[in-house]
Image: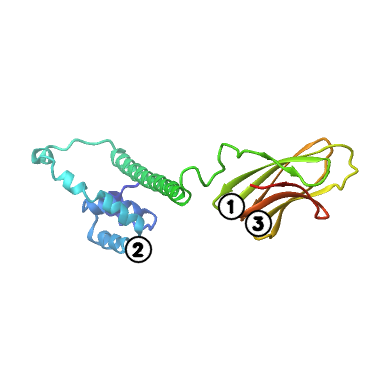
């Protein structure tokens, strides 16, 4: 592996290697020409500016080394020592970047949860774990069909769930609709289905009308005849 000190001695001008000159630049180990070249590169490289900022404290740490240790007879270091130090420094910088990104993701998730709680309040924004109570619908005309209806209130309106059972042979009109009638007399069809004899059908529909503005929930035949009704 080529170190910044080797490139300084031989005047290597490789653009790919200039990213590794951060430590040599901070320690003042670059030649004047290489230092000028690196400073020009630094002006347009965010990656190198970040590396230089992270290594800026290195000269201060080295200044704390006792003078006698600096002037002592140098001991030959293993040839690969400098390379290993630079590899370790890059690993530390990568870990710091990962921790920064992970911390930002956690903070964003916390903000999202808080925003949902503020917008919907506790227990809202998701369907309640307790189903709403079902009420038997009243027959308006003789018909081989019975049903119960349950209303669930949400910020956006009302969910209506109907459990409907058809009795006897299929000789009755086979089409049904689920209709909401508001206090102003307006009707809104929120579901429709076909008869399946001797089988309970579970149907649901949603309306923007709140329960306080609902006069009745009705099951009607396909020709519009009210068969069953529930007043909330």
The structure residue drawn at horizontal position 24% and vertical position 55%, both measured from the top left corner, is: 30
On screen, residue 192 versus residue 18, left or right, reads right
Q: Secondary structure at mark 2?
A: loop
Q: CA distance from mark 2 to mark 3?
A: 66 Å
Cα separation, mark 3 vs mark 1, equals 9 Å
**Mark 1 packing: few (<14 Cα in 10 Å), some, or many (20+)?**
few
Q: Nearer the viewer, residue 5 or 166?
A: 166
3D distance between C-alphas at marks 2 and 1: 64 Å
- Which of the 4 image quarters holds residue 39? bottom left
Residue ID for mark 3 = 182
Residue 132 percent location from the top left of the image: 60, 40
The crowding category of the residue bearing disc 3, from other C-alpha atoms within 10 Å (few below 14, some 14 to 19, many at least 20), is some
In the image, residue 220 lies at what x, y percent? 78, 50
Q: How is the image coloured?
A: rainbow
Between 43 and 195, the residue placed more toward the observer is 195
150 sits left or right of 89 in the view: right
SS class, disc 3:
strand
| Residue denoted by label 2 | 44
Counting residues from the start of the chain, the first of labels 2 and 3 encountered is 2
In the picture provided, is 209 more to the left or to the right than 197? left
Q: Return the residue at label 1.
A: 212
Residue 72: numbered disc: none
What residue lies at 27% left-to-right and 49% top-to-bottom? 54
Front-most of residues 202 and 55: 202
* Picture coordinates of residue 96, whole percent (x, y): 34, 44
């Amino acid at each position: 592996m080529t170190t910044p000190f080797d490139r300084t001695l031989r005047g290597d001008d490789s653009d790919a290697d200039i990213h590794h000159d951060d430590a040599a630049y901070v320690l003042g180990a670059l030649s004047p020409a290489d230092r000028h070249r690196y400073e020009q590169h630094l002006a347009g490289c965010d990656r190198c500016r970040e590396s230089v900022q992270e290594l800026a404290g290195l000269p201060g740490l080295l200044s704390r080394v006792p003078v006698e240790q600096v002037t002592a007879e140098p001991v030959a270091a293993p040839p690969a020592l400098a390379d290993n130090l630079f590899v370790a420094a890059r690993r530390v910088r990568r870990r710091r970047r990962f921790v920064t990104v992970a911390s930002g993701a956690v903070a964003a998730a916390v903000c999202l949860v808080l925003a949902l709680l503020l917008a919907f309040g506790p227990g809202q924004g998701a369907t309640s774990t307790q189903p709403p109570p079902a009420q038997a619908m009243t027959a308006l005309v003789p018909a081989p069909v019975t049903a119960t209806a349950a209303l669930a209130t949400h910020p956006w309106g009302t969910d209506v769930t109907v459990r409907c059972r058809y009795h006897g042979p299929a000789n009755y009109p086979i089409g049904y609709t689920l209709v909401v009638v508001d206090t102003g007399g307006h009707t809104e069809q929120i579901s429709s289905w076909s008869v399946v004899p001797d089988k309970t059908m579970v149907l649901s529909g949603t309306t923007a009308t709140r329960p306080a503005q609902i006069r009745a929930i009705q099951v009607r035949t396909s020709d519009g005849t009210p068969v069953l009704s529930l007043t909330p």
